[in-house]
C-alpha cells in the first residue's frame, strides 16, 4: 500500500518561498512509469494541478505557475519537494501530493491520480 505524507510550514509570509516535502512509503518514486505531483485546492475553489516529477526525474509544470514553481526529489529518502516562490495570499490552499501514472502523457487531471496524501493547509499571511 502506497502512502504519501506532506510536511512543511503551515504559515508563510507574502513574497517568501513556500516549501513542502512529500514522503512516500510502500513504493519507490523511481519506479517506472509513475509520476509524482503537487495539487492544491484554494478555499472555495476546485483542485489545481501544479506540476509533476516523473520516475526518471523529468519535471513538468502548470503554465500559470511555471515561473514560480520548482519540484525536486531526494531518491535516498524517497521524497519529493515543492518550492513556490513569491507567494501571495492567493496561494493560500490545501496542498496535496499524489501519485499518477505516465500512460498517454503526463497526468494532469485529478482523476489520473490514485494515491494521495492527506493534504496540508498552507496560509499566506503577514
Image (tube, rainbow, N blue to C red):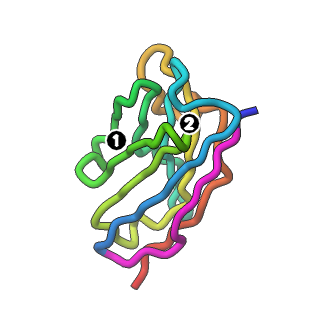
* Position above or below: 65 against 84: above
Judge whether residue 13 is colored magenta: yes
The single residue placed furthest to the bottom in the displayed view is: 126
Query: Position of 59 compared to 33: left or right?
Result: left
Q: Nearer the viewer, residue 96 or 46?
A: 96
Q: How many marks?
A: 2
Q: Nearer the viewer, residue 70 or 92?
A: 70
Local crowd size for mark 2, using a 10 Å CA cut-off: few (<14), some (14–19), many (≥20)? some
Query: Where in the figure is residue 44, as x and y percent of width and height?
Result: 56, 62
76 sits to left or right of 83: right
Dot 1 falls on a residue whose secondary structure is loop
Q: Quadrant of the C terminus?
A: bottom left
Q: Quadrant of residue 14?
A: bottom left
Residue 9 versus residue 109 in the image, above or below: below
- Residue under label 1: 62
**Magenta segment boundaries in residue numbering:** 3-14
How crowded is the residue under tag 1: few (<14 C-alpha within 10 Å), some, or many (20+)?
some
Relative to residue 35, is residue 2 drawn left or right? right
Q: Tell me which residue sits at (51%, 62%) in the image.
A: 93
The single residue placed furthest to the right in the displayed view is 1
Task: Measuring from the top left, give residue 40's x and y in whole percent.
Answer: 51, 52
Label 2 residue SS: helix
Q: Position of residue 82 (x, y in %)?
A: 42, 52
Q: From what the image shows, is residue 36 above or below residue 79?
A: above
Q: Residue at x 70, y 41 (%)?
A: 3
Identify the residue at horizontal 43%, vertical 74% (top origin). Answer: 12
Magenta residue check for 64: no
In the rendered image, which quarter contains the N terminus? Answer: top right
Report the residue that reaches farthest toward the top: 104
The residue to which callout 2 is attached is: 110
Instruction: Answer above or below: position of 112 versus 78.
Output: above
Q: Give whichever of discs 1 and 2 has the lower sequence position.
A: 1
Amino acid at each position: 500500500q502506497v502512502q504519501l505524507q506532506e510536511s512543511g510550514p503551515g504559515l508563510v509570509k507574502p513574497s517568501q518561498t513556500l516549501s513542502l516535502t512529500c514522503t512516500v512509503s510502500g513504493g519507490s518514486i523511481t519506479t517506472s512509469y509513475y509520476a509524482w505531483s503537487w495539487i492544491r485546492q484554494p478555499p472555495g475553489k476546485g483542485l489545481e494541478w501544479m506540476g509533476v516529477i516523473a520516475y526518471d526525474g523529468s519535471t513538468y509544470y502548470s503554465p500559470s505557475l511555471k515561473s514560480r514553481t520548482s519540484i525536486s526529489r531526494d531518491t535516498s529518502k524517497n521524497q519529493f519537494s515543492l518550492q513556490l516562490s513569491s507567494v501571495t495570499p492567493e496561494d493560500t490552499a490545501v496542498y496535496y501530493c499524489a501519485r499518477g501514472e505516465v500512460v498517454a502523457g503526463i497526468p494532469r487531471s485529478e482523476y489520473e491520480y490514485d494515491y494521495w496524501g492527506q493534504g496540508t493547509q498552507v496560509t499566506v499571511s503577514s
